[in-house]
Every structure is written in structure tokens, then in C-alpha cells.
């Protein structure tokens, strides 16, 4: 995966005559199943002198790209910085904020079902020798690369499979079915009628969202719509070829279009210009839902705060390089004159503090998004939530640690004891991760799908790796991911501690296949232990090495590790139970033998704070980009059993996700109930509850907490 980005300096520079925030969002060359934008901000404020605010990384030195040609996939997120109001600063000047997401060349890597009416010949790369042929029929086609050695007769590298056999080679683009050929060549398009329908549906969805924040919002505005059209037309060179020259043209001239199209009254207000895009897969309603999600993510990622006060807006849409591109213009009132200005800075995803004194008060002031998960102490805005959650858990005799998330900010709440002498609030306390680990295994599988150019894929049969499993030729990797393989195995404790290879063999020796694949949902750890075994075979690394390098080190997790790698100062919370009157009964710890046997399915320790980082990393580019996350979630297709389980999490129709995990023979129980975008929700790691089960299950408690967090202002 190759990422193109502008260089990010280690200091925030403020200069210029007019207040303006220009956001440049460069894009990944669209790889298999995905596109990954990386956002960098250049910020300007009204001042005669240049001011620098140094960035201090409290967690570890920032891994900034060494040069503009770096191919390291670094994700940036905004940190809000308060700028002083000086006598020379016109604080009533409007903010013009531009955020455009560059569009790379057409996607040459994707998977699709294709029907060939005639025999297909596959060639070697040089097209000097036939390597295989495919009979007419319906196949899974993985497109990986395209050459333009002959513009009249380009060739594309493909893998063609039907579940039992797979063939690789190069074929002429003209041999592909029409729609796939258009997609490869970036000629995929929609009719004017469909584009109009998409625009109308998007406007309605956007208007409903904006009105929910601002009841006084007017209808979409014709001037704003015309401005969006002119901007989109002006930005086309950059969307089609995101190079420095084309970006500079936008930076130098976008305000000219605003001044030509909008009234002086409009120009005195704040203006936000947001560009975004998505693929054309699905009907208009499906495309609009994807487009709206991208627009919302883009506005949040670039720190647009006045969206909640939008009074006018307009949109325009075009199809470019086989993707639909949207351009939105939003207007909102200028803030109160006494309000300090806020600049958005993009920094690597770590805990970053930027300190800038406020001239009017003479004291330091910093406002930043909390990305570390845990907060050392409650501030006033969390007090009501803190009290409500603590009271609720104590009433149910539940002990543990909770992370609540509201509008992207998070806060930790601790209840009860980890041991007789240690509270759950102690930073050293960790909990068994249990089944919440499964999505990590699924994420690494998705990474390897990309890295192997789909040689490893969700339709591949289990027989390619473990042929002796009954029905292995009928069971796909997607069946394992979704617990619909027909495999069943009780969570039994082996007689001794097992190595990784022994644990996989223990699973192979003890699993059963009472059902045919894809007939019913049957949750079992065996599916994910087999997945861990597949990852080991493909990557030629141990599962522990894969998780350590790709997840733990990548995210800088300080309290997440495998059961046999526990640091000497870490304290595992005891499992205990309550009879509804007395707590801390029958304390116990996880069985090492049991933990050793559930490789890939629940053999780690962690904290809810670290798990929040994992959930964020699944979508922000640190572990997976959003399109890859959707691939792991099987694009939220209906699941067998109707529970929405795909790739380690349950996905619900209302853009919610949840998961629950326990450990056999103990009272450990973990749960998560979050918005899909991780903006609101709750993560609970508990080590005590009532036996027998209380009226409120953990999922029920999570839903109550989440509802209260969302409602609390």
C-alpha cells in the first residue's frame, strides 16, 4: 500500500492576513478493497508575526514521516489548539475552512463475481506464454494489477477461483465483462437520473442531520449549491491528478470562487468546504449511506466544529475515476468576538499536548481530543455520568472498569476491587480479554489479504490449510470468521499448558462438525484458533509475533499482552462472585492451561482503555482503513442466524456494534456497545457479578449506560 502525503512540520505556524484553515487530505492509491486518506493541516491566523507552538508527545516521540516520499502508513488526527486574542487580532473575522480528499487513479485491485460466456486464456506477464485457461462459467475474480504497455490492449493480473480451484495469470482487459472492464479502466459511471437521485437523497439525509443540531437550519441554498458546483469543477484537475501543482492552484484560487458566487453577507460568516468520495457499488440509497458516512467522517476528522450551527448548505456531485465525488459548502455564524480562535493540527495518533498562552488572561489554555482512552481523574463534565454508572453497577454488584465515550472523548470509571488489597482503579490492573480478542485475529487476516494480493481471501476453503478437518473443502475462511462453519467444540481445559502449535493440534483433535457449513450460527473458539493457525502458515510467524508487531506495538498499547508475557508489575484482577448481599466470594484466577488452548480466540490480557484504542485503530488506518474494516464486517450483509456477527463483532442495522466475552469456569465478563464510528458508547471489563445471573445482563447494563451517556449534556 503506497501513501502520498504532504510534509507535516513539527510546529504549528500561524501567519497571514485573513483567518483561514486549509486542509489537504492526500489519498492512498486505491489498493485491494480500500482507499486510505491521510490528512494533514496547514493553519493560518491573522497576525503580523509568525508564532510557533511546539508539539510535545507525552507518550513517545512522534513518528513523523522523514520525507515527502515516505510510504509508511501514518494516520493523523486533529488536536484543538487555542490561540490568543490580541489587540491586533480581528476575532470577528470569518473562518474559511477547506477540506478536500484527493482522489487517486482508478482502483485496479478489487474482488467481484464474474460470469464468462466464453473460454478465458491466462498468460504470463510478458504475454509470451499461455499459463492456464478457464472454462465458461461463474467465478470469483480478484483483480490485482494493470499494465498499460499497450493503451489499445491493456492487460490485467487476476486470480480466478470457484471455491475448489484457483488460477493466476494475466488477461486482456477486453476479455472482461463490460461492467468489470469499465471499473478497471475508471470508466464506471452512473446515469444523470441516478446521479440526480443520489443528490436528492443525500441532501435530505444531510439536512435531517444538520437540523438535529440546529433546528433553525434553512433549506439547502441555491447560492451554496451553485458555489459547490463551481468549486467541484475547479477542483477536477486535483481530484484526477493529486499533485502539488494542482493543489496549489486550489489553495490560491478557491476564495476567488467564493467571492464571485456568494454575497457579502455570506462572506462575513464562516464557510466550510468539504470534498469526499466513495465507490458506486449498490443502489442509490446504499451509495448515499456510504457517501454520507464519508462526509461525516471527513468533517469530524478535520475538526470542523461549527457544523452544529450550520444555517445554509449546498452540494454538488460528479463521477470521477469510477467513484462518486461530493462537494459540500456550509455556512455558519461567526463566533462571539471574545471566543479564542481554535486551530486544528493533524498529529500522529498519540497523546499530544499543545500549550499556547491566552493573552487576555495570561494563563495557559489547551483543548485537545483525548486519544489515550484513560483519564486520571474526573472533571466536572463527567461527574453526572460517573455517579450514574457507579450507582448502576454497584446496585447490580458488578465490579470492574468501564470506559464511556461521548462525542469521541472518553472517560474511565472504576468500581470495586481487583484483589483484597488492590482496587480496580489501579493502573496496573488488567483483565482477561476473552472473546473480545477475536476481532484482532480477524483484523490480521484482513491485513494479510491485502499483503498477499488476495491469494489469502475469505472464500478460500479450509482444506487449503487443514485438509483433514471434516467438510474442510466446503468450509470457507468467511465461515470461520462468522461462526457458520458447522464446527463445534466445547471450551474444555487441557491437562497441561500448551504451546501455540500444540493448542492448534488440540483443537484439530477435539473439534466436531455436526452441521454442514452455512446452515446455522454456532459460536465456538475453535473457528478462531483455526484462523490463528492459518495466519501462522501464511505469514510464517507465530500468532503472538503477528499480534505484537501489528497491533500492540503499532498502537503503543501499554496494558495489553499475552497470558504468558505478563509483566512482573501487572496485576490480574481476581474473578469473584456476589450472592446479592456479600461481594468478593470465591476468588479465582484464569487457568493457564485454558488460556494456552484458546489461541486467537481469548488468550490475552488487556484493559478497556487499550481496547478502545484497538477499536479506533480498526477504522482510522492504524490497523485497518475503513474499507478494510467493512470487508472484515462483510459489508454488514445479513448473517446466518440474523445476529449480525461478522469477523469478531456483532453489527446492527442502526450503525451500532457490540461484543461480549466470558472465560469458562470464571466470573470474568467483558462487553462493548459502541457506535460504528466509535463516537459514543461503553466498554466494560468486569471481574464480579451475581451468581446466578442478575436480571440485568452485561449487554443490558451496557445499553443503559450508553443511552445515559448519549442523553447527558
Image (spheres, rainbow, N blue to C red):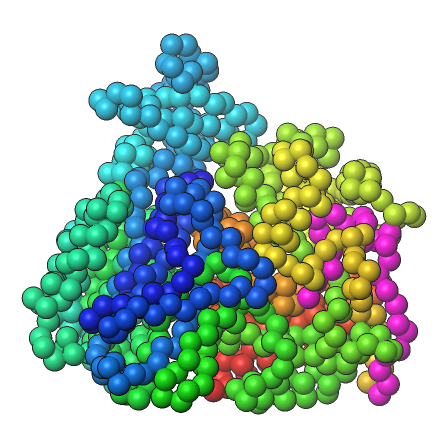
Q: Nearer the viewer, residue 608 or 484?
A: 608
Q: Nearer the viewer, residue 349 or 190?
A: 349
**As displayed, is residue 688 above or below residue 101?**
below
In magenta stretch: residue 558: no
- The image shows a total of numbered marks equal to 0
Q: Percent from the top left, x then y, of residue 592?
A: 86, 54
In magenta stretch: residue 588: yes
Q: Which residue corresponds to the image point at 74% horizontal and 75% vertical from the top-left?
A: 426
Which of the 4 quarters of the picture holds residue 21? bottom left
Q: Residue furthest right?
A: 495
Q: Percent from the top left, x then y, of residue 350?
A: 53, 62
Q: Nearer the viewer, residue 580 or 520?
A: 580
Q: Percent from the top left, x then y, of residue 259?
A: 10, 68
**As displayed, is residue 171 above or below residue 431?**
above
Q: Which residue corresponds to the image point at 91% horizontal and 47% vertical from the top-left?
A: 496
Q: Percent from the top left, x then y, of residue 176?
A: 33, 28
Rendered-image quadrant of the N terminus: top left
- Mark yes or no: residue 609 visible: yes
Answer left or right for 562 relative to 309.
right
Answer left or right for 609 relative to 96.
right
Per the rendered image, the range of residues in magenta is 581-607
Which of the 4 quarters of the picture holds residue 583? bottom right
Q: Residue furthest front?
A: 49
Q: Which residue corresponds to the image point at 51% horizontal and 57% vertical from the top-left?
A: 62
Q: Which residue corresponds to the image point at 71% horizontal and 46% vertical from the top-left?
A: 544
Q: Nearer the viewer, residue 189 or 154?
A: 154
**As displayed, is residue 450 above or below residue 410?**
above
- Mark yes or no: residue 483 visible: no
Q: Residue furthest top?
A: 129
Amino acid at each position: 500500500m503506497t501513501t502520498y502525503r504532504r510534509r507535516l512540520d513539527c510546529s504549528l505556524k500561524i501567519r497571514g492576513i485573513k483567518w483561514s484553515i486549509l486542509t489537504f487530505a492526500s489519498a492512498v492509491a486505491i489498493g485491494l478493497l480500500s482507499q486510505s486518506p491521510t490528512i494533514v493541516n496547514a493553519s493560518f491566523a491573522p497576525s503580523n508575526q509568525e508564532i510557533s507552538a511546539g508539539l510535545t508527545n507525552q507518550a513517545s516521540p512522534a513518528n513523523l514521516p522523514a520525507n515527502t516520499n515516505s510510504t509508511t502508513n501514518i494516520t493523523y488526527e486533529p488536536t484543538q489548539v487555542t490561540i490568543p486574542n490580541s489587540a491586533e487580532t480581528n476575532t470577528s473575522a470569518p473562518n474559511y475552512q477547506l477540506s478536500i480528499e484527493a482522489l487517486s487513479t482508478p482502483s485496479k485491485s478489487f474482488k467481484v463475481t464474474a460470469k464468462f460466456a466464453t473460454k478465458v486464456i491466462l498468460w504470463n506477464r510478458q504475454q509470451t506464454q499461455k499459463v492456464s485457461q478457464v472454462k465458461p462459467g461463474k467465478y470469483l475474480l480478484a483483480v490485482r494489477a494493470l499494465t498499460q504497455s499497450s493503451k489499445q490492449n491493456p492487460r490485467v493480473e487476476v486470480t480466478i477461483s470457484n471455491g475448489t480451484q484457483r488460477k493466476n495469470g494475466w488477461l486482456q482487459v477486453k476479455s472482461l465483462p463490460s461492467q468489470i472492464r469499465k471499473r478497471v479502466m475508471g470508466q464506471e459511471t452512473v446515469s444523470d437520473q441516478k446521479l440526480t437521485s443520489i443528490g436528492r437523497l443525500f441532501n435530505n439525509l444531510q439536512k435531517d442531520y444538520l437540523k438535529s443540531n440546529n433546528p433553525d437550519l434553512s433549506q439547502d441554498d441555491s447560492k451554496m449549491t451553485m458555489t459547490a458546483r463551481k468549486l467541484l469543477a475547479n477542483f477536477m484537475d486535483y481530484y484526477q491528478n493529486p499533485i502539488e501543482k494542482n493543489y496549489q492552484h486550489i489553495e490560491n484560487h478557491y476564495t476567488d470562487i467564493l467571492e464571485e458566487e456568494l454575497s457579502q453577507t455570506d462572506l462575513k460568516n464562516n464557510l466550510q468546504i468539504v470534498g469526499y468520495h466513495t465507490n458506486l457499488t449498490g443502489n442509490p440509497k446504499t451509495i448515499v449511506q456510504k457517501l454520507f458516512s464519508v462526509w461525516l467522517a471527513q468533517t469530524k476528522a478535520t475538526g470542523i466544529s461549527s457544523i452544529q450551527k450550520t444555517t445554509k448548505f449546498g452540494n454538488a456531485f460528479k463521477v470521477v475515476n469510477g467513484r462518486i465525488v461530493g462537494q459540500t459548502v456550509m455556512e455558519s455564524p461567526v463566533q462571539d468576538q471574545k471566543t479564542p480562535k481554535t486551530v486544528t493540527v493533524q498529529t500522529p495518533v498519540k497523546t499530544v499536548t499543545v500549550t499556547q498562552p491566552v493573552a487576555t488572561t495570561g494563563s495557559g489554555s489547551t483543548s485537545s481530543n483525548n486519544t489515550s482512552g484513560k483519564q486520571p481523574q474526573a472533571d466536572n463534565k463527567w461527574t453526572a455520568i460517573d455517579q450514574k454508572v457507579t450507582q448502576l453497577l454497584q446496585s447490580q454488584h458488578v465490579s470492574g472498569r468501564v470506559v464511556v465515550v461521548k462525542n469521541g472523548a472518553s472517560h474511565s470509571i472504576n468500581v470495586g476491587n481487583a484483589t483484597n488489597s488492590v482496587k480496580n482503579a489501579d493502573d496496573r490492573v488488567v483483565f482477561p480479554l476473552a472473546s473480545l480478542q477475536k476481532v484482532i485475529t480477524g483484523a490480521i487476516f484482513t491485513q494479510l489479504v491485502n499483503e498477499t494480493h488476495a491469494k489469502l481471501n475469505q472464500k478460500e476453503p479450509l482444506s487449503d490449510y487443514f485438509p483433514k478437518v471434516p467438510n474442510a473443502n466446503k468450509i470457507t475462511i468467511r465461515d470461520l470468521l462468522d461462526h457458520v462453519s458447522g464446527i463445534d467444540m466445547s471450551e474444555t481445559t487441557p491437562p497441561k499448558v500448551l504451546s501455540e502449535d500444540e493448542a492448534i493440534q488440540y483443537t484439530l483433535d477435539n473439534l466436531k462438525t455436526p452441521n454442514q457449513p452455512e446452515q446455522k450460527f454456532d459460536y465456538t473458539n475453535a473457528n478462531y484458533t483455526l484462523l490463528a493457525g492459518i495466519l501462522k502458515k501464511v505469514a510464517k510467524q507465530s500468532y503472538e509475533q503477528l499480534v505484537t508487531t501489528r497491533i500492540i506495538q503499532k498502537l503503543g498499547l501499554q496494558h495489553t499482552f499475552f497470558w504468558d508475557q505478563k509483566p512482573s508489575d501487572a496485576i490480574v484482577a481476581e474473578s469473584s462472585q456476589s450472592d446479592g448481599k456479600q461481594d468478593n466470594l470465591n476468588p479465582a484466577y484464569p487457568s493457564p492451561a485454558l488460556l494456552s488452548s484458546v489461541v486467537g480466540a481469548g488468550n490475552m490480557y488487556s484493559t478497556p482503555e487499550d481496547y478502545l484504542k484497538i477499536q479506533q485503530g480498526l477504522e482510522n488506518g492504524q490497523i485497518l482503513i475503513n474499507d478494510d474494516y467493512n470487508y472484515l464486517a462483510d459489508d454488514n450483509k445479513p448473517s446466518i442466524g440474523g445476529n449480525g456477527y461478522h469477523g469478531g463483532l456483532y453489527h446492527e442495522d442502526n450503525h451500532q456494534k457490540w461484543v461480549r466475552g466470558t472465560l469458562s469456569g470464571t466470573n470474568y465478563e467483558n462487553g462493548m456497545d459502541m457506535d460504528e464510528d466509535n463516537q459514543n458508547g461503553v466498554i466494560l471489563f468486569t471481574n464480579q457479578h451475581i451468581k446466578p445471573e442478575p436480571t440485568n445482563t452485561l449487554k443490558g447494563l451496557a445499553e443503559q449506560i450508553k443511552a445515559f451517556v448519549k442523553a447527558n449534556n
